[in-house]
Image: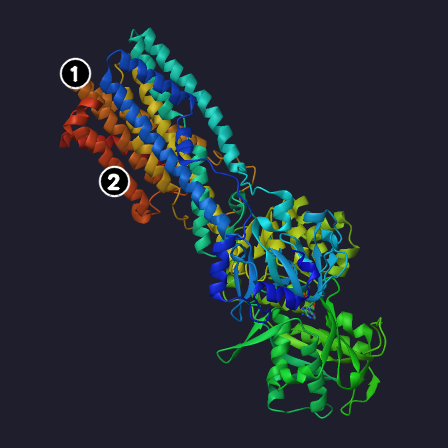
Amino acid sequence: MEWYKLPVNEVERKLHVFHKRGLLQTQIDERRKKYGENLMQEAERPSILVLWMKQFQDFLVLILFAATFIAAILGEYIDATAILLIVLLNGCIGFFQERKAERSLEQLKALSAPEMRVLRNGEWKTVQAKEAVIGDVVALRTGDRVPADIRLVQVNALQIDEAILTGESAPVHKQETALIRGGEEIHNQTNMAFKSTLVRKGNGVGIIVRTGMQTEIGQVAQLLEKTTVTTTPLERKLADLGKVLIYIVLALTILTVLIGLYDGKPMYDMFLIGISLAVAVIPEGLPAIVTVTLSLGVQRMLRRKVLVRKLSSVETLGCTSVICTDKTGTITENKMVVKELYMNGQYIVYDDLLQSNLPKNISTNNVQQMLQFGALCNEANLQVKRGTYVVDGDPTDGAILIAARNYGISYVEDEKYHKVTMEPFDVLKKRMHTIVEGEGGKRYFIMKGAPEEIIPRSRYQLDTNGRKFSADNTRLQKAAEHMAEKAYRVIAIAMKEIKDSPVNETDCIFLGMYGLFDPPRKGVKKAIATCRNAGIQTVMITGDHPLTASAIAKEVGIVYDAHNEILDGKALEQMSDATLQDVVTKVNVFARVTPTHKLRIVEAFQAKGHIVAMTGDGVNDAPAIKQSNIGISMGITGTDVTKEASSIVLMDDNFITLQEAIKEGRNIYENIRKFIRYLLTSNVGEIILMLFAILLSYPLPLIPVQILWVNLVTDGLPAMALSMDRPEKNVMDEKPRHPNERILSRGLGWKIISRGLLIGLVSLIAFIASYHMSNDITYARTIAFSTIIVAQLIHVFDCRNERGIWTRSPFGNLYLVGAVLSSLILLFVVLYVPFLQQIFQTVPLLKGDWGMIVLLGSVPTIVNIFTKHRKK
Ligand code: ADP
Ligand code: MG
């Protein structure tokens, strides 16, 4: 169907929809059933079976299987079955961990799915783009990704970048009228908007005519939405660490086996023990647990309104040393209210206006005209919900509309003027304009924007009778600054009557200025202080006036002493990159800057070695967001483009949330350190026990199934529980971590070796002592087996603290308590269930035995109490 050739009413008739009302629910359901979801085809995912089999690919596990097979041939059925079962169980744990990680990643993807504004049953709402059906009426705004193929019915300076489809990078100007001739080329179908293209400017409304794979992009590309799995730096670092560890473990295992053989132990026994030891001790699961930890952290963040789009950013968050944040909406509430008007030398408190207390040299007409024109040169809409105004669109414009409405300028009055054209607000030019046609066909050019932009283009003002007189521009500038000092966002408005186009934007009549107030968010001051305490500098970047910016910056503590500097866009423009780098770390507020400056600011900080988190909401912010180490977009005010460029979305646009995210980022990294510490310490202990026993010519202290059981019982649940630990109290009292820091730095490596040695030694002592006392190897092995498990389960609580022990209650992490209890139960079953006693070659232990086991098992923790800890 060639939709571009049809006039709008024809399109409406064919699709049974009216563009002022949208589809009805019954139509939507019906069409969704018929055409399916508005999605591109996805690549197939591996089946559950494949994923499960993957767990056993590991080379060592395969050897273990082979060994079991040999054992079975030799008639060791019990051994063989037990080993097989344990390996399968281990595989299941790995499988569930991986599934969990994958699931949560999928959930994340679903959450960051694009949305659209759609008119259904007469009401505008936001839904996921995949829910779009043919006939849906959708709104397009600057920065949106077009959700489907759309026949436009209403456009407002709409320009769309269709490079993704046509390769042409210059945006296409769109219109609404039907194309009778031509238009076969996509590029020429100027009344259409195509799925996945990008709205660069303006806005519009249209009717969806094709969805999903039927769209142009679906047709040409047959794109498979591949979910490319990228590993994070930390996962890579761990994989590298894992490789090193494998060699160390293998060397030690081979050493153990060789010494055992030299000592005259049977070849077959040593072979099986070697393999089991290697399987138990090689931390093959590390990268998987890291992924699980990261994605669990990501879910915790989600509950706090932080959407993580790139897993790797969770790690980087903890390294953040500079936050470059927007003012409007992030530091402030973005609830603009007009507080003051300036007109003819007078500052009028807006609320006084409503009491009609006008100063002498101002007439009601003056006020009315200014407010009326402000409402006309405006991109927002107002809806009345439950008796209050709800702004649809830019809050600044919304406040200006409300100011007009409250003064009695109604929609009916607007109808007296007919909008001819509108140039939307441009952050680079810091102004916008409209041309309207009033009574008697008179045309007016209305311009509104930052005072520095409007005042130089104005030449006159109006007196009480509406007569022109020359304006004093210096005086107007002073007035603008005076208002900015009061933390007001100042917006000036001017107009002129025009006859011909093109209009030259000079010699306008200055109507006045609005002073808008946007209160800082509650709690921001504290969040900024917390960040400073954590070695993170907060820098405000705003398009607003330096005086407005610094007034707010002082209030929230971004500017806190006399050395803090404020740099404005003009000065920045003059600076070379080198000069900028010299001053950048001293600047706390960048005012009157444009999005292009943002990029330079990020680069300057990075050149100084900083890890920069940068927020942004507009289309033009995307390059800076991409360049920063952690790009942050806004869930509410952000455009699709910035969201796509960002690695984190603040769903409530709130600075406090960002600070929480950084804290969580630090915590996640610490949790990773915690379980690495725990796992490796345990493994060192196991190797030490075996190696030293053999060196001392004792019988093997553990048999293969026991080794594998120790590994299963201690590694699985407790490590997972550690990864869910809450932050230690003072994570935000330390300087940010250097991104290149090694995982085992800050004393972690030493802790692992020394505590591992202790765990191994106490288990060995328990083994030797009980062996000499009873001369019963089964009993001695049971003791060694229990001691090494108990020692590890006690030690796991030490791992929660990097900053001293007993600072945290052991019950602070209930998952861990639960995990340790279930591990103990797993220990008890193999000791006390007769059938399992046979398989695991254990004997039931008595009270006295347990006394010794717990005492010896606590030694590493007791030593821990008397050692120095990481400083604050
Ligand atoms: P911010 O960093 O606060 O988002 P902006 O870049 O949005 O700053 O705005 C810069 C300046 O442009 C403001 O100080 C104001 O004077 C002017 N301005 C902002 N929004 C509008 C608007 N909708 N219409 C006219 N002028 C505006
Ligand atoms: Mg803005």
Query: Does residue 272 appear in this view?
Result: yes
**Kind of residue at badge 1:** Asn
Question: On the image, numbered disc 2 is attached to which residue?
Answer: 821
Read off the residue under disc 1: 775
Which structural element holds mark 1?
loop
Q: Position of residue 327 (x, y in %)?
A: 61, 63
What SS does tag 2 mark?
helix
Q: Give the residue type that dot 2 points to.
A: Leu
The image quarter containing residue 60 is top left
Left or right: 355 with respect to 160? left
Q: Quadrant of ligand 2?
A: bottom right
What whole-number distance in Å separates the C-alpha atoms at marks 2 and 1?
A: 31 Å
Q: Say whether mark 1 is within 8 Å of ligand 1.
A: no
In the rendering, which numbered label is found on residue 249? none
- Mark 2, Cα crowd under 10 Å, few <14 / some 14-19 / many 20+, is some
Residue 8 position, x and y percent, is 66, 66
Q: Nearer the viewer, residue 724 or 26?
A: 26
Res. 331 visible in picture: no
The residue carrying pointer 1 sits among few (fewer than 14), some (14 to 19) or many (20 or more) residues within 10 Å by Cα, namely: few
Q: Residue at left 82%, top 86%?
A: 468
Q: Nearer the viewer, mark 2 or mark 1?
A: 2
Expressed as whole percent of the image width and height from the top left, the position of residue 201 reads 70, 61
> Is 125 left, or right, of 761 in this rendering?
right
Residue 868 is situated, as x and y percent measured from the top left of the image, at 40, 38
